[in-house]
Image: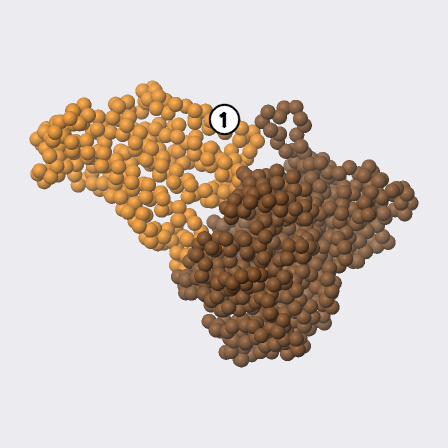
Chain colours: A orange, B brown
Amino acid sequence: MTSDRDRTDPGRAEKSHESAVSTIPDGGTVNTPFDVVSEYEETRRDRLKKLYDTYVYAPISIIKRDWRARIGFAIVLLYVFTATVGVYLIEPTHVTEGPGLAKPFETWEYPLGTDDMGRDLLSSTVHSTSEILKMILSGGLFTVTLGTTVGALAGYKGGVVDTVLSSITDVFINLPGLPTVMVLALMLPITGNPYLIGVLLTITAWGGLARAIRSQVLTLRQEPFVEAARSMGVPSYEIVFKDIVPHLMPFVVINLTNAARRVIFSAAGLYFLGVLPFRNHNWGVTLNLAYSGGAHYKTGALHWFLMPMIAITGISIGLILLGQSLDRVFNPRVRARHEKKLAESQLDEVEPEDDDSETMIGAA
Amino acid sequence: MTTSQSTYLDDPTANDPVMEIRNATVRFGMERGESRVLDDVSIDLERNEIFGVVGESGSGKSMLASALLDAVVEPGVLDGSITYRPQSGEPVDVLELNKNELRQFRWEEVAMVFQGAMSSFNPVRKIDTHFIETLTSHDYDVDEGMERARQLISDLYMDPERVLDSYPHELSGGMKQRTLIALSLILEPDVLVMDEPTAALDLLMQRSIVSLIEEIKEEYDLTILFITHDLPLVADLADRIAVMYAFEFIELGPTAEILQHASHPYTRLLLKSTPNLASPIEAMRPIEGSAPDPVNVPSGCSFHLRCPLADEQCVDVDPRAYPVGDGGDHVANCHYWEDAPETIPMTEEWDVEGIDAIDSAPGPSRADGPLVSLEDVEVHFEKEGGFLDFFSDPDTVQAVDGISLDIYENDVVVLVGESGCGKTTFGKTAVGLQEPTAGSVKYKGQDIWDLKRTGGDGSMSFDAVRRALQIVHQDPGSALNAHRRVGTSLEVPLKRWNPELDGNDRKSRIVSLLEHVGMAPAEDYIDRYPHQLSGGEQQRVALIRAMLMNPDLILADEPVSALDVSLRVEMMDLMIELQEQFDTSYLFVSHDLSNARYIAEKTGGRIGVVYLGELVEIGRPEEIIHDPQHPYTQALRWATPELDFEGGGMGGESPVRNIDVPDPTNPPSGCRYHTRCPEAREVCTTEHPEPREASAADFHEAACFRTDERHEYWQSPSITDD
């Protein structure tokens, strides 16, 4: 508390029990708003209810109304389900488990067929899902966290901080992506750890996001609400992450899904080329094997190619749909409309002004 | 839903209407029901008149403009009939026109001037391109048209060659707005619809443009529909005034009639709530309540919820248009129009409550020395030079140039001036949000920027300064984080500065403050997002947030200019009340002399007049309003529109020689005002006047040679042409 404001002014008296350091005992006047004690009690239960309303109920009810979100969410959930539960339902496959190159839907034992060594394609697709999802997760989070943090700090702080961070960003933007990844994959002791591979694949991808975020922050930092926070002495990191970044969330989410897709595509591509180290089979490796097995010219082996491709395309579509629809979740207007408590009563009286003003603006 | 008609058809003078609007209704289907944003409006626009439409935001006045041009945006539906009668030829039914005819009609017969001159021009194209494009797309002869454009621009007191060869950003706001007027007249329309054409401009510029509009109207034989929220402004200009409330006209009549014998309670309350310079401040009262929702307009008279005269008849029966007086051209939609003048008198106090408390405002206590002291503060911004511009010096904008000001405890200083004169920059410097390039800013004797850099001598920390100096922004919508609820936004200062409070303590303090400023039930407001609040409520939240810091000085940067006229007095009263309770000082920034006077007079504060980065005059409101010494203050005084209840036109000739403010990167030498000053003499161009005592009154200083009777100014030859 400040030491310079020790005026014993009853007008400034605050609630006396609140602090021993700062406040003067109540002078007896009840004129100031600080003296008015209203009975505001909020129990833990209320708070949990509110948290539930904000972070669970509202997003879900927003998502429910958007078909893109429903489909995207269903697809992504299917993959997550496959990666977590599916691996227990379907036995891992091994060489000469079945006949070589069995066609899909020929027997129910191998519904998606087998490869030339008799491995069940369904099983190998299912069992590589979790590894790919781990890569996506780590790669996507790495890109978005680093890109947003570096970009937002550089844009907000300016000056030397900006120069240093922006220079680092530029270096990473200008690294040639594919060769860097290949060299690093050979040099580093990764040994097929999917999380590390995810980070490795996006090591040059966060720079672009950081640049884009920085330029957006440059305009947002001039906003009055940021200036107000500054004048209240709120620390910079709080201003950046609580005031500024929420405004960029739709953009960040789109970038998260794009980064995730980038991870899948480059992982599949690099496995196909045989550059990345791997422990188990995955979609990319299967593609590689299919190619070297000549599936592209052998009749009756096309499904060998198709299965991993469908798996890759499916999750990519799911992520795109989800990313596109999630931006609505971060819009406070949409959120407010979907929250239980406010939804019925007050919104009705407040919202027409918005609608009206929008139409007015449109008209003018 | 109301079913009334605002019908003014039996006007005996109405023999040559240029536009007839009958039963115009605009509907928007919304999820919650049908919203009528224009409700059965009928009106005649006489040829060659200036027709003023006055209403608060959201009263449907812009929708009326759109309806005139059949330009209601989707999914709005316009019903009724709109007939345009050209000087010669057949009447045109506007709503029956096809797309091509409509395109011709819109700019060639009826043109429109929008509010946002800033966004009406394409920033990457030169001004002349806009003119040429308009001409070619309407198949006009370009050379002839450009000749007319030059004439128009010079009629609006601008240099045609310079303007046409500029990019939009190179013109000031006032010049852009005038260029826009020229552009709207390029195809020689008969009717000009102006939708808040001056709202974004300064008073002096507004006033200048308004007088230009009159000249233009005479010269080009126009009929003008002038839409505004500012009754005093249009009162000088319009022949007839219509007042809109809740999407219909509630009163209409000749200007003088409306001003002297306003008969609808809303009009009378609106007149009373408008701050002005002449009437005593006690007479200015806010209108209780807020404007109705377009989906849910009250039954009967739409104003009955806020009306002091309302009874059952008003709830049940929608009033028709009652003729007022003998002329028959003044009508009011009120059952009790005869009683309104008695119940709502214009001058006497009719509600004494609450005024006494404010009269006893303590005023600044100067004994302890200044709270914040600014000495010779300069803020210069460097404009970045071009990429290959190694040799020329960079341009500097001298936003603030040598202002000294002391602010005491419980003090109120109001800075007035045109936009771009540096008053906001100076204000931000005073609260430590902008570092001065020269001079010092001291808080209780400590230089705050030294304190920030070196940590000071230990007696005070920069944190204490940061806490003591707060800001309330102009636009409450962007001053609150749109992603945070009211409660979360308000918790920030408490979390930062009162860490000993737990969640419930913080909440109860916030709740009690919200209730104190009239936002009840506060528990509901806490959980709202800013977009769920009205502008006035947002500004209250921003104000409370600053107050929760328990600051010593608040910079209020045009805190009421984003609000509706009827809410301004209420907000200013609230700020004054909070000042007393929290024992703070205010530094107000305003471009409006009547608001400045209201605040300063109620608090015993001072008004400072800023021109091009310099403080040209400062003093008590009595002196500044009634005995201004600096010619610029006199000009501002002239520019402040007044409600002249006795009728009569503009208050004399314009006291400025040049309506545009000089370029702040290259301010005039000597006295900076000499380029516009009607009293300028040779000596003003070379010598710079220092502030000196301007009258016998306390704290009245002006920076003008005319205050010194022995100055060589009086021997110097005049440089004005006339």
The residue tagged 1 is A167
Query: Residue A24 location in percent, x, y?
Result: 64, 54
Q: Residue at x 43, y 49 (%)?
A: A331
Using the rendered view, name the quadrant where residue A304 is placed: top left
Query: Residue A35 location in percent, x, y?
Result: 60, 60
Query: Residue A330 location in percent, x, y?
Result: 42, 48
Nearer to the camera, B187 or A276: B187
Q: How many marks do you count on the picture?
A: 1
Query: Residue B692 location in percent, x, y?
Result: 83, 46
Outermost residue, bottom side: B313
- Look at the numbered disc 1 and give the secondary structure of its residue: helix
Vertical placement of residue B326 versus A36, above or below: below
Nearer to the camera, B380 or A361: A361
Which amino acid type is marked by label 1?
Answer: Ser
Vertical placement of residue B324 versus B704, above or below: below
Nearer to the camera, B406 or B233: B233
Q: Residue at x 39, y 49 (%)?
A: A329
Q: Residue at x 52, y 44 (%)?
A: B136
